Image: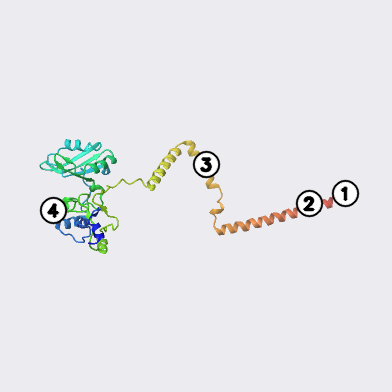
Amino acid sequence: MSSSNSNKLNAVFYAGAYHPIQAGSIDGTDILPHDNAIYRAHLCSSAGLYDPFGDPKVIGDPYCTLFVGRLSRFTTEDTLRKAMSKYGRVKNLRLVRDIVTGASRGYAFVEFETEREMRRAYEDAHHSFIDDSEIIVDYNRQQLMPGWIPRRLGGGLGGKKESGQLRFGGRERPFRAPLRPIPYDELKRLGIPPPPEGRYMSRFQVPSPPRRKRISEERDTSLYENKRRMNSEERDRSPHRSRRKRNSEERKISSPRTRRDRSPEERETRRDKHSYSHRHHKHGQHSHHHERRSRSRDQLSDSD
């Protein structure tokens, strides 16, 4: 076995976006669904049948919310809140229960006061124990992972070997670095992101959850312009401001156009007129000067 293949045995990568066919592949390079559940999830994804924001029970800030799985059926809201409070201030908690029996379904969503507290629980609470049950934690993939399809529709992540429906790419079961050639053309045709050649991670590295995007410069500019417009409207409501604005507009309307506003033809015509008026003015001054000199000579001759 070559050294490159030996290194790849311990190299993994994680899914940044969810694709049902890729999630069913151990190395993220499959191009065909290998079980009916994946086929069903792929249909839901292609037809847009699942809305991750359509659940009215999902509330709170997704960047501060943690998914907690593999809970004991005997774990209650109070027990879970007490356990999660070791990592930060718990703002909201929802233990998912069966709508008919009311029994716990073994997973919950915990919202913390800040994103920093959620990240602390994300790193430290994974594989901890609550009520003698080893739990797993993950970020809120339902709202933060593009293309997410839940387990009930054939998607999800993880799973048990006995079910024959393992899903890869998540924190618990990452993709393995592929040892076979990667079918780039087929993956591109299906919209599946290819494995990150040369940028694999170690099994012992903790993948970072998505970070909240900062406000873009365009939004900053938009907020600034809105504030300026509101301030301008408030000033315009003043009678003095209205009078000054009206006078300014009247001066602007009555003032002649500047040279920059004129077309080339208009500028040429004005140049010719100016040249003609300048010559005519000089000629008039010259004639007036001769007339004054002749008048002076006549006066001198009369006095003689």
Q: Residue at x 17, y 52 (%)?
A: 153
Q: Residue at x 68, y 57 (%)?
A: 279
Report, in whole angstroms, how far the alpha carbon at label 3 lies from the one at label 4: 82 Å
Work out whether residue 68 or residue 172 is closer to the camera in this orientation and state it.
Answer: 172
Report, in whole angstroms, how far the alpha carbon at label 2 lies from the one at label 4: 120 Å
**Decide: marks 2, 1 in contact (CB < 8 A)?**
no
Query: In what element is the residue under mark 1?
Result: helix
Residue type at mark 3 is: Asn
Residue at numbered disc 4: 161
22 left or right of 281? left
Report, in whole angstroms, how far the alpha carbon at label 1 lies from the one at label 3: 62 Å
Residue type at mark 2 is: Arg
Residue 184: quadrant of the picture:
bottom left
First reached walking from the N terminus: tag 3 or tag 2: 3
Judge the density around disc 1: few (<14), some (14-19), many (≥20) Cα neighbours within 10 Å: few
Residue type at mark 4 is: Lys
Residue at numbered disc 3: 247
> Can you tell which of label 3 and label 4 is closer to the viewer?
4
Residue at numbered disc 2: 292
Report, in whole angstroms, how far the alpha carbon at label 2 lies from the one at label 1: 17 Å
Give coordinates of residue 302: x percent, y percent: 87, 50
Residue at numbered disc 1: 303
First reached walking from the N terminus: tag 1 or tag 3: 3
Residue type at mark 1 is: Ser
Query: In what element is the residue under mark 2?
Result: helix
227 left or right of 299? left
Quadrant position of the N terminus in the picture: bottom left
Query: In what element is the residue under mark 4?
Result: helix
First reached walking from the N terminus: tag 3 or tag 4: 4
